[in-house]
Amino acid sequence: MQRIIALCAVVLLLAGCSQNAPLEDLADGNCTIALAELVDKHISGQIDALADKDWELAHSFASDNFQANVSIDDFILIIGTQYGMLIENKGYQFNECTVDGDTIKQEVSVLSGEQKFSLTYNLTVNGSTLGVESAIVSEFVTQINI
C-alpha cells in the first residue's frame, strides 16, 4: 500500500513538472487561464502600490526597458498627471487578455470618483518576468447618480 501511495505521489509530481509555465511559448490569441491570472496579479500589484503611493514598488512592476528609460521622479510625474484614477481608484476589474506577438494586452476597468475608465495595459516578457510597458486610457464614462 505504501508503494502505491509513493508511486501516485511521484506521478503527480512529474505531471506537475511537465506543464509549461504561463510565460513560455506564448501563442497569439486569448490568454490562457494561467497567463491571465499571472497578468492580473502583476497589474494588481502595480495598481495597489500606486494607491499606496509606494512609487518605487509601483515602478518595479514596469518592464526592464521602461525602468531603464524612465526615472522614479519622471514616473511619479507621469502617474500624477495622466493616471490619477489609479491612485484614487475605488476598485478595478480585469476584462479581455490577449497575446499579440511579444506583447500581452490586458483590458482593465477602473472606477475612480464618479468615473469609470477603460485602460489597455501592454506587458512584455523578459525571460520569466512580466513587465508593464504602457497603459493607455482608451475611454472614460462619467456616472451620474440620480
Image (spheres, rainbow, N blue to C red):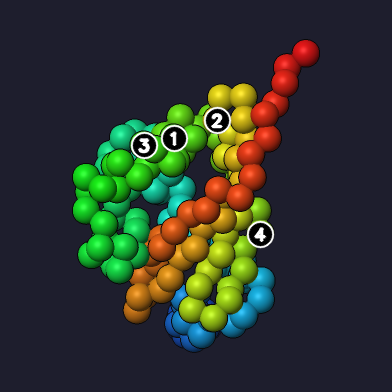
Q: Earlier in the sequence, mark 1 or mark 2?
A: 1
Q: Earlier in the sequence, mark 1 or mark 4?
A: 1
Residue 80, label in figure: 3
Image x and y of residue 103, in percent: 50, 73
Give the mark toward the camera: 1 or 2: 1
Q: Secondary structure at mark 3?
A: helix
Are discs 1 and 2 less than 8 Å apart at CB? yes
Report crowding for label 1: few under 14, some 14 to 19, many 20 or more residues within 10 A (C-alpha). Answer: some
Give the mark toward the camera: 3 or 2: 3
Mark 1 → mark 4, Cα distance in angstroms: 23 Å
Which residue is located at x 34 percent, y 59 percent?
62
Give the mark toward the camera: 1 or 4: 1
Are discs 4 and 2 less than 8 Å apart at CB? no
Give the mark toward the camera: 3 or 4: 3
Image x and y of residue 131, in percent: 38, 64
Which quadrant would residue 133 be assigned to in this image? bottom left
Residue that badge 4 annotates? 96
Q: Earlier in the sequence, mark 3 or mark 4?
A: 3
Are discs 1 and 4 less than 8 Å apart at CB? no
Are discs 3 and 4 less than 8 Å apart at CB? no
Callout 4, which amino acid? Glu
Q: Earlier in the sequence, mark 3 or mark 2?
A: 3
Mark 4 → mark 2, Cα distance in angstroms: 20 Å
Report crowding for label 3: few under 14, some 14 to 19, many 20 or more residues within 10 A (C-alpha). Answer: some
Mark 1 → mark 2, Cα distance in angstroms: 9 Å
Q: Earlier in the sequence, mark 4 or mark 2?
A: 4
Q: Is residue 23 above or below residue 105?
A: below
Give the mark toward the camera: 4 or 2: 2
Are discs 3 and 1 less than 8 Å apart at CB? yes
Q: Is residue 28 left or right of residue 72?
A: right
Image x and y of residue 57, in percent: 27, 47
